Image (cartoon, rainbow, N blue to C red):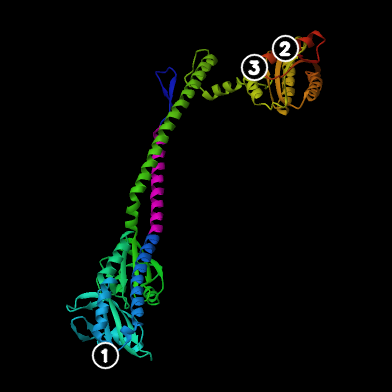
Amino acid sequence: MKRKKNNGKGGQWEVSFFPIIRYNVIFCVLVMVFIMAGGAILSAGRMKSDAKAALSSAQAQISQRVTGAVDLLEALASFPDFNDPETEPIVKVKRLDQMSPYFGFMMMCYVDEDILVYSDGAEPASLASRDYMQRLFSTGQRQVTDSFAAGADGETLNYTVAVPLTDQGGNITGALFSAIYFDEVVQILEESAGKVNANATLLGSQGQVMSSTTDLSYGDPVMEALRDDKLLGTTSDKLEEKLLAAQTGGYWSIHGGDLCYTAYQRVDNTNWDILCSVSFGDVFFQILPSLLFVVCLAVFACIILLLFLKRYIEKQMQVVKMLVQSMEELEKRVYQNERPENVDFNEILRLTSDGLSDSLTGVVTRTVFLNKAEAQLKNADPKLVKALFFVDMDNLKYINDTCGHDSGDIALKSVGYILREYEKKYDGVVGRYGGDEFVMLLTSLDDEKELRDVLDGLILRLQSKIPSGGQNIPVQCSIGVSVYQPGIELERMIFEADEALYHVKQNGKGYYHIHQN
């Protein structure tokens, strides 16, 4: 705030809003930074939850598909129609061909003890060269293969689930197997990852990429691709060990300059692993519109706050201008309309402050007393007694005439000092009403008995002698009292106390009288 001169005739007070605007802009920027930082933290949390959600969905669906195929084939393997070597292979093949479309398999086939596969309308073909068939016949355990090229064209990719057929002696008499569409697994990965804008990769038993929604190529070792990323908190070797141990977990990494979180898990009944990754950029830009909306609301709120603050300050400036005008008027009175070049406004403020209290006795002026007394009457406890005292010095003129005005001033100071003690003790206010008259309001008297005790003590303290100039100055006061009644005005109380004081003056002075309604 600064004062502008106006042709040497006083001035106008102005306030600069530039600092307020500057701090408001800084506040808005900080709010935006905090909102964006909160969005970043929220994005990091969502990265983990989205990756785990995509992984859980993909793992559950692929595991269900594989487990369903295993359960179906094992159930069929227990039937005599498929387990009986005497049953013609063609009969078994026809029954499997009828079931295959119903259960959604590419094909379901029968393999005899010579590892020959039979299909409808085709000569049996040897599967002896297939590693998974060799393991099945040698171990007697079911097999779930990685994706591989099959079919007449040697290009169709599929996954194979095979279970052994055994006789009553536990000897392997053949096998049943089904082929799961490769595209079916790809679709599961794409749907599961697409729901949360993630990327999914299916790894084979040797850590090779079998299917991926990213730019990873089929058959590439995934660890070679991960070596280009910066893994946080782990290494590619440690990650490979966890995948081989069929552990479930996750890791953070920097891929292409973007922060990523990847969750991984083993597919049930297989040696496959699924990795689902979510990047920070994808998640953050997904919630960015919401963040920008919140930022706009925050900026709008800051603008509204600035406008309200500007309006409030302008109203306060009206009050300041009124005070300045009052100070200038006082300045004219102090300097009798001859204003010096350099005005000491601190001096004017001191004079204004002194105008609130009587400089001789220290009590407040008559006007201030009336305002404060009104407020205290309204806020006082209604259960307590409230009384107004009208105190008059009986012999001030005699003291002034015989001992001098300095002695009279000492006597007035003594009376003011004593009354201020009672003012503080009984939650009151005391003011100088006239030359030798004081008014005092006390609002925390317990009852009328305490009122009379206070009066008895006060009248004794006010009747004393004050040493001055080698002599003792006698001081005597009379007191008129008005007790507050509900609904009575302060002006009425002063009138009643004055009447009570008049009664004391007419009956010998130097005592007190309580006005009787």
Mark 2 vs 3, N-terminal side: 3
Q: Secondary structure at mark 3?
A: helix
Q: Could you tell me what secondary structure mostly forms the magenta stretch?
A: helix
Q: Nearer the viewer, mark 2 or mark 3?
A: 2
Q: In the depicted view, which residue is nearer to us: 35 or 333?
A: 35
What segment is highlighted magenta in the picture? 17-46
Cα separation, mark 3 vs mark 1, equals 125 Å
* Residue drawn 21% across the image and 80% down it: 120
Q: Secondary structure at mark 1?
A: loop
Up-down relation of residue 202 to residue 389 (above or below): below
**Residue placed under numbered mark 3 in the picture:** 366
State which quarter of the image contains the N terminus.
top left
Q: Which mark is residue 114?
A: 1
* Pointer 2 local density, CA inside 10 Å: few below 14, some 14–19, many at least 20: many
State which quarter of the image contains the C terminus.
top right
Task: Say which amino acid is labelled 3.
Answer: Arg
Mark 3 vs 1, N-terminal side: 1
**Residue placed under numbered mark 2 in the picture:** 498
Q: In the depicted view, which residue is nearer to us: 418 or 132?
A: 132
Q: Which mark is residue 141?
A: none
* Pointer 1 local density, CA inside 10 Å: few below 14, some 14–19, many at least 20: few
Residue 365 shown left or right of residue 253 in the figure: right
Task: Say which amino acid is labelled 1.
Answer: Asp
Up-down relation of residue 289 to residue 76 (above or below): above
Residue 212 is at least partly visible in this image: no
Q: Nearer the viewer, mark 1 or mark 2?
A: 1
* Residue drawn 25% across the image and 83% down it: 91
For the residues bearing labels 1 and 2, Cβ distance under 8 angstroms: no
Percent position (x, y) of residue 112? 27, 87
Percent position (x, y) of residue 61? 34, 68
